[in-house]
């Protein structure tokens, strides 16, 4: 796949402004699309859109196919008659620029339950046919996910491998009994998914009308506590009690001295091969319903995965285990055609990873914040003159500090290398615009910049610090007033000047 010379902005929808404590797929999402259009951009990149669990990371979702209920726009539900004025009485005190996921978990789920109650009472009959059609079209994943979520609720939120053995092990009689006893909760989950996809489809159509394509992000691994792991247990390394025997992560690198212990179950590739990698075909098919391009997080895991024995305290004591990426992508390509995939090929990249990426002509990634480290930095692959055309260049990603924050905290050697390379001496105020210009001027076909860098914000606006948990991750939001027309004009001028 070859991307035409172009540019875009990275912003997760949770970071959109709005009155109810988190970004939503309504008016503010359309306003952001309009701003992208006025800024001459062609892409909006988002992080995974799945329903988040403990830790609130979009990379640890309860399903590889479902959408995040937190993003459902409540004003739209009110306009459709699914919520009434009385449902909004006693609103919590929402933080204007920071997501409180604990509050969202309680309050928003109550609001969505009220919306379902209005629907179940027959107050909005016009939606019934569309809902029934959605349930039928998405039954392959939706039925299992709705049952999983209903069971999780009935077990006080415990992970599936802590449920009683009959439902943990998916014994048919136990599942049939659960479907009967939990029928209202199951339909509520299905209806909430219907609302999410209905609104996301509307936002995506709005973007397409304005020439904006969506770059979506899918994690290579599924979460331990997910419908995917519960339903497809034989396709992962689990013992008889549903405990993983090995888990995923990465060895020590520039993000962490002890590596990253993600804890995701690892794929049993031999089992997946038996049905022609059917789960992966369905996963990519589902992703293409959401996105125009798909960025695969941790692409190198399709060549080899860092396998860590379970349990472990860090990711240090692991080993690389080969994965059948070529065979899997061949099967997906045969089923779905040319794959619009961006390979996140950062970290420990070996010749087999490069061959897998290049054999399928997937664009790789480059991050300019990584370009100026080390002593002999002239050989750094991320330096602008070393970039390739079939590549996506970023100033930074969701796992980096903001570019302004990076410059403030960079090692003196990195700053020195940047000054030597660019023959410049930027200030804290000018560095992010300069690095953005370098990205746009590069030969990489696609340049993507986090919105925080366009706003020239510091570390306070960082989205995630890998290897950590807490309320500083995934919570950043901007205010509506931040999305200024003059910033759009400046970005459009740069875009036109650099032929993007």
Image: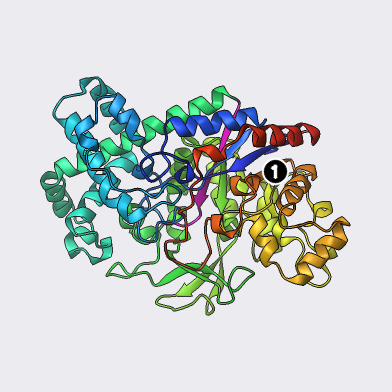
Quarter of image, res 5: top right
> Does the image show residue 80?
yes
**Residue 144 drawn at (x, y percent):** 28, 46
* Image quadrant where one finds the C terminus: top right
Q: Which residue was labeled with disc 1? A: 447
Indicate left or right for 420 with 74 as reference.
Answer: right
Q: Residue at x 44, y 69 (%)?
A: 247
Residue 80, placed above or below residue 274 = above
Q: Residue at x 40, y 56 (%)?
A: 56
Q: Is residue 166 magenta?
A: no
Residue 406, placed above or below residue 74 = below
Indicate left or right for 247 with 418 as reference.
Answer: left
Quarter of image, res 498: top right
**Residue 95 drawn at (x, y percent):** 39, 50
Provide the secondary structure element on which disc 1 rests: strand
> Does the image show residue 138?
no
Question: How many dots with numbers?
Answer: 1
Q: Residue at x 39, y 72 (%)?
A: 245
Toward the viewer: 278 or 55? 55
Residue 278, placed above or below residue 256 = above
Toward the viewer: 184 or 231? 184
Magenta region: 211-222
**Residue 226 drawn at (x, y percent):** 34, 55
* Image quadrant where one finds the N terminus: top right
């Amino acid at each position: 796949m070859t991307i035409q010379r172009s540019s875009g902005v990275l912003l997760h929808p949770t970071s959109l402004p709005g009155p109810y404590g988190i970004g939503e797929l309504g008016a503010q999402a359309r306003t952001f699309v309009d701003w992208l259009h006025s800024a001459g951009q062609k892409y909006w990149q988002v992080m995974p859109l799945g329903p988040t669990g403990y830790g609130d990371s979009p990379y640890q979702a309860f399903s590889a196919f479902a959408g995040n209920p937190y993003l459902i726009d409540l004003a739209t539900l009110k306009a459709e008659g699914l919520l009434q004025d009385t449902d909004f009485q006693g609103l919590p005190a929402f933080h204007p620029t920071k997501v409180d996921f604990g509050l969202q978990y309680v309050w928003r789920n109550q609001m969505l339950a009220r919306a379902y109650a209005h629907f179940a009472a027959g107050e909005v009959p016009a939606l019934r046919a569309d809902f029934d059609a959605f349930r039928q079209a998405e039954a392959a994943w939706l039925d299992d996910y709705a049952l999983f979520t209903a069971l999780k609720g009935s077990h006080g939120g415990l992970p599936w491998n802590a449920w009683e053995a009959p439902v943990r092990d998916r014994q048919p009689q136990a599942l049939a009994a659960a479907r009967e006893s939990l029928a209202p909760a199951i339909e509520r989950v299905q209806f909430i998914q219907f609302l999410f996809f209905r609104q996301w489809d509307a936002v995506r159509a709005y973007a397409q009308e304005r020439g904006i394509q969506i770059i979506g992000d899918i994690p290579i691994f599924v979460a331990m506590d997910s419908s995917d792991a519960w339903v497809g247990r034989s396709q992962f390394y689990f013992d008889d009690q549903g405990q993983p025997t090995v888990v995923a992560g990465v060895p020590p690198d520039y993000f962490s001295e002890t590596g990253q212990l993600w804890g995701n179950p690892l794929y049993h590739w031999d089992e997946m091969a038996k049905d022609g990698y059917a789960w992966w075909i369905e996963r990519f098919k589902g992703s293409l319903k959401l996105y125009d391009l798909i960025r695969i997080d941790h692409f190198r895991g399709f060549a080899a995965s860092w396998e860590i024995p379970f349990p472990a305290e860090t990711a240090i004591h692991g080993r690389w285990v080969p994965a059948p990426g070529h065979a899997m992508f061949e099967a997906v390509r045969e089923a779905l055609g040319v794959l619009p995939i961006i390979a996140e090929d950062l970290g420990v990249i070996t010749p087999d990873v490069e061959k897998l990426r290049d054999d399928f002509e997937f664009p790789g990634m480059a991050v300019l914040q990584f370009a100026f480290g080390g002593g002999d930095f002239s050989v750094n692959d991320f330096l602008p003159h070393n970039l390739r055309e079939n590549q996506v260049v970023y100033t930074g990603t969701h796992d980096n500090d903001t570019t302004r924050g990076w410059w403030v905290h960079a090692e003196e050697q990195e700053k020195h290398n940047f000054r030597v390379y660019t023959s410049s001496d930027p200030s804290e105020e000018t560095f992010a615009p300069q690095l953005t210009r370098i990205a746009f001027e590069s030969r990489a076909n696609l340049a993507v910049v986090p919105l925080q860098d366009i706003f020239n914000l510091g570390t306070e606006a960082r989205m995630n610090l890998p290897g950590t948990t807490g309320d500083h991750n995934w919570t950043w939001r901007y205010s509506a007033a931040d999305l200024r027309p003059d910033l759009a004009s400046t970005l459009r001028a740069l875009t036109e000047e650099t032929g993007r």
